[in-house]
Image (cartoon, helix red, strand yellow):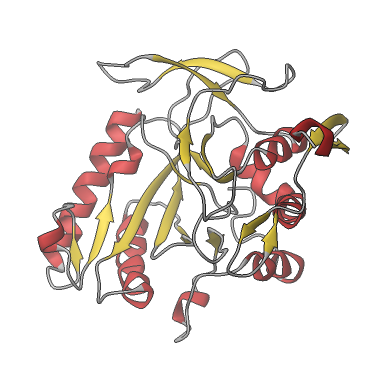
Amino acid sequence: MSPADDAQPMEVGGRTLRIGHLDRVVYPSVGMTKAEVLHYYLQVAPALLRQLHDRPVTRIRWPEGVGGEKFFEKNTPRGAPSWLRRHTLPASPGTDDEGTMLDLPVLDDLASLVWAASQGALELHTPQWRVGPRGAVRKPDRLVVDLDPGAPAGLAECAVVARLVRDRLADDGLDTHPVTSGSKGLQLYAPLDGRRTAVEVRQYARDLAHELAAANPRLVVAVMRKDLRGGKVLLDWSQNHPAKTTITPYSLRGRERPAVAAPRTWDELDAPDLRQLTPDEVVARLGTVGDPLGEH
């Protein structure tokens, strides 16, 4: 049987998609199949699409599941549906060296999201800026600080540092939202008013990280040198560069066991058993406590 013979038509968001290998095991450690991956994305779509809206998406694809080969994909692949929204944009917009032009997809409707997931795109990464309907790159509407622990530091240390970052950003009038990354650490997002350029936001984040590292040298580091990171939390400010992307809240992660980049409340960061959340837990939380990011 050819791959085309296996494909099943699905009506999604007013579009007909042909999706094959629904019984393929994507996460062998728990037996989670491609059909279950698609079901997860359908369940979280309202919250996830708010985060994807108007943002070009870099995908990390595992066509054969997390036990197989993976690859990064920025450009829209051959064979993508003709209705898929896409924009030709510079690789590093708003900088002196904007780099090569890329053909970037925007997954801001249900059919586009399911199409990407059906291609094995488990991880969806987005920049801190959005693009207008005619392809104009807008100034960043959020600042992100990625908290990456160096062993033996872990998520508990990230939670401590997260409060340091939150309090410092509050001094500048910024409201901060935590997201456990689905990997080792967590991210902090702060909505911006869109007045500053990406270069200005990146410099602000860099200065903030170095300021907090200087004030808390036993716990915080602002440079990526591995020999300096043991037992500390790296404040990775670099993801505010216009060429960089960050795992999108509610995206799955391509790890051995399925986990999600999950928006959390500040009260949850107080829990002594703070950990990364599974897809089922994230779906359940959306049904009980809602989306901690709300309209952000």
Residue 183 or residue 73, whichever sits in front: 73
In the image: residue 162, left or right of residue 57: left
Q: Position of residue 286 (x, y in %)?
A: 71, 64
In the image: residue 171, left or right of residue 179: left
Residue 219 or residue 164, whichever sits in front: 219
Q: Position of residue 180 (x, y in %)?
A: 48, 64
The quadrant of the image that shows the N terminus is: top right
Q: Residue at x 38, y 21 (%)?
A: 91
- When the figure is inspected, residue 153 is found, relative to residue 7, above or below; the finding is below
Q: Residue at x 20, y 73 (%)?
A: 231
Q: Position of residue 168 (x, y in %)?
A: 29, 60
Residue 81 or residue 191, whichever sits in front: 81
Q: Position of residue 294 (x, y in %)?
A: 64, 54
In the image: residue 160, left or right of residue 51: left
Q: Is residue 269 visible?
A: yes
Q: Is residue 7 visible?
A: no
- When the figure is inspected, residue 151 is found, relative to residue 148, above or below; the finding is below
Residue 116 or residue 205, whichever sits in front: 116
In the image: residue 61, left or right of residue 143: right
- When the figure is inspected, residue 232 is found, relative to residue 249, above or below; the finding is below
Q: Residue at x 48, y 28 (%)?
A: 74
